[in-house]
Every structure is written in structure tokens, then in C-alpha cells.
Image: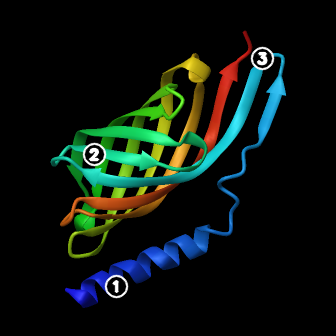
Amino acid sequence: MRRKLGFSLLVLTLLLGLFGGTQFNAVHARSSAEGSCTQVGGTFLINFVDQTTAIAALTGDLQGAVRGVIVKSAAGDKGVLNLSLEHAITTSSGDSIRTADQAVLTPVQDKTYFMSQTQTIMSGTGRFANATGTIKEFGAVDMATGQGVLRYSGQICTKAS
């Protein structure tokens, strides 16, 4: 068991090391007459509630909480899982974002997977009313324990009032 955990932590450390050099937590805004776009980044700390629902604490620019639901799952070659999901993000200030998503889980060892996901913003409230954009994540998920960690980065655009 210790060897499996050590291997999983090594894989996660390597992944974060490879991508950790990118500045994810800096917020950069671009404004125009049509609106503005903001770069966002941080982490998802995931806990599965059951086989199709997870909750996560968000750090970084979207600090708050998220609820994700797997709406469709399809097995691929070599143990790969292809998922369609929906997420409801609520920031600590009460603003919200709803997304429609695609994820790929690639087996690393036993029930540990490398996860890559693209979230497409469908709607929002508060400062995210009429928002559009894409958020991408990568990280590790241990389906045996129902836990995982993902890094996110992306762009959220809002229309000028």
C-alpha cells in the first residue's frame, strides 16, 4: 500500500512540476468595448460523494466550492474513461458559473488516473452573468479513495453593461 501511494504521489509531483512553471494564479484582464476577459487559475481539491457526484474546494482566482456530476461515461481503449460532466461553481463572494465539460481519465496504476478536463462556461450569475470562456484542468484522481487534485487555468469573458 505504501508503495502504491508513493508511486501516485511521485506521478502527481512530476505532473505538477512539469506544468507548475506556468503562472496560473496571476489574474490578467483584457478589456474592450465588447467586454473584458480575465485569466484565472488555481486548484480543485476533490472528494467523490458517490460514483457520479463530486464536490471540491477551489483555491486561487475562483476561490469557493464546486459540485460536479458525471452525466455520461464511456470506456475507451486500455482502460481510458471518457466523461461528459456538468459543474456548478460558487465563489466565496456568491457569484456562480455553470459549465458543460469533457474529461479523459487515463489509468496510471490500479484505480489512480491522470485526468484532463475542459470546462465550457454555459452561464453565470453576479460578476459572471453572461460569461463565456473555457477552463482547463489536469491532475490525478484516485478512484479507490474518491479523492483527487486538479490544477485549473483558463479565461472567463464578460460582456460590458
Q: Label 2 near label 1: C-beta < 8 Å?
A: no
Considering every residue shown, the one lying at the far top of the view is 161
Is 5 placed left or right of 118 in the picture? Answer: left
The residue wearing badge 2 is: 54
Q: Name the N-terminal-most of marks 3 and 2.
A: 3
The residue wearing badge 1 is: 7
Q: State the image coordinates of residue 27 (x, y, percent, origin top left).
A: 72, 44
Give how far apart the Cα atoms at labels 3 and 2 are: 35 Å
Q: Nearer the viewer, mark 1 or mark 3?
A: 1
- The amino acid type, in three-letter code, at marker 3 is Glu
In this rendered view, identify the residue nearer to me: 160 or 116: 160
**Placement of the C terminus among the 4 image quadrants:** top right
- The amino acid type, in three-letter code, at marker 2 is Ala
**Residue in the image at 40% along x and 55% along y:** 45
Residue 121's disc number: none
Reply above or below: 112 against 75: below
Q: State the image coordinates of residue 60 (x, y, percent, origin top left).
A: 58, 49
Q: State the image coordinates of residue 67 (x, y, percent, origin top left).
A: 33, 38
Q: Name the N-terminal-most of marks 1 and 3.
A: 1
Considering every residue shown, the one lying at the far front of the view is 93
